[in-house]
Amino acid sequence: MADPAKPISRDDEIDRLWRDEIRRRVEALRSGEATLVDGDEAFAAIRARIVERQKR
């Protein structure tokens, strides 16, 4: 677990957001709330956001 006194790096925050989003998408697929096509589109959108953040 991360040291609470240590600031979170930008890369660590992006990794956390990525894992959280993947977890939400997998749960939606498992529950039937989303299809694989929805998942593919969502992952493409997530990747685009990460690339955009990395450019800043």
Image: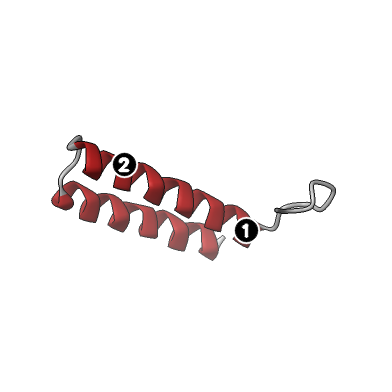
Residue 40 percent across, percent down from the top left? 22, 56
**Type of residue at label 2?**
Glu
Q: Position of residue 50 (x, y in %)?
A: 46, 58
Label 1 vs 2, first from the N-terminus:
1
Near-viewer residue (17 or 31): 31
The image quadrant of residue 49 is bottom left
Side of 37 where 42 appears, left or right: right
Q: Which residue is mark 2?
A: 27
Quick one: quadrant of the C terminus?
bottom right
- How are the residues colored? secondary structure
> Alpha-carbon neighbours of circle 1 within 10 Å: few (<14), some, or many (≥20)?
few
Identify which amino acid the numbered label 1 is placed on: Asp
Q: Position of residue 12 (x, y in %)?
A: 62, 58
Q: Nearer the viewer, mark 1 or mark 2?
A: 2
User: Under tag 2, what secondary structure?
Assistant: helix
**Left or right: 6, with 52 as reference point:** right
The residue wearing badge 1 is 12
* Residue at disc 1, secondary structure: helix
Point 85% across, 48% down: residue: 5
Q: Quadrant of residue 47?
A: bottom left
How far is disc 1 from disc 2 in space, using C-alphas?
23 Å
Q: Residue 3: x and y, percent?
A: 79, 52
Which residue is pictured at 19% across the width and 40% down the height?
34
**Which residue appears farthest toward the right when viewing the image?**
5
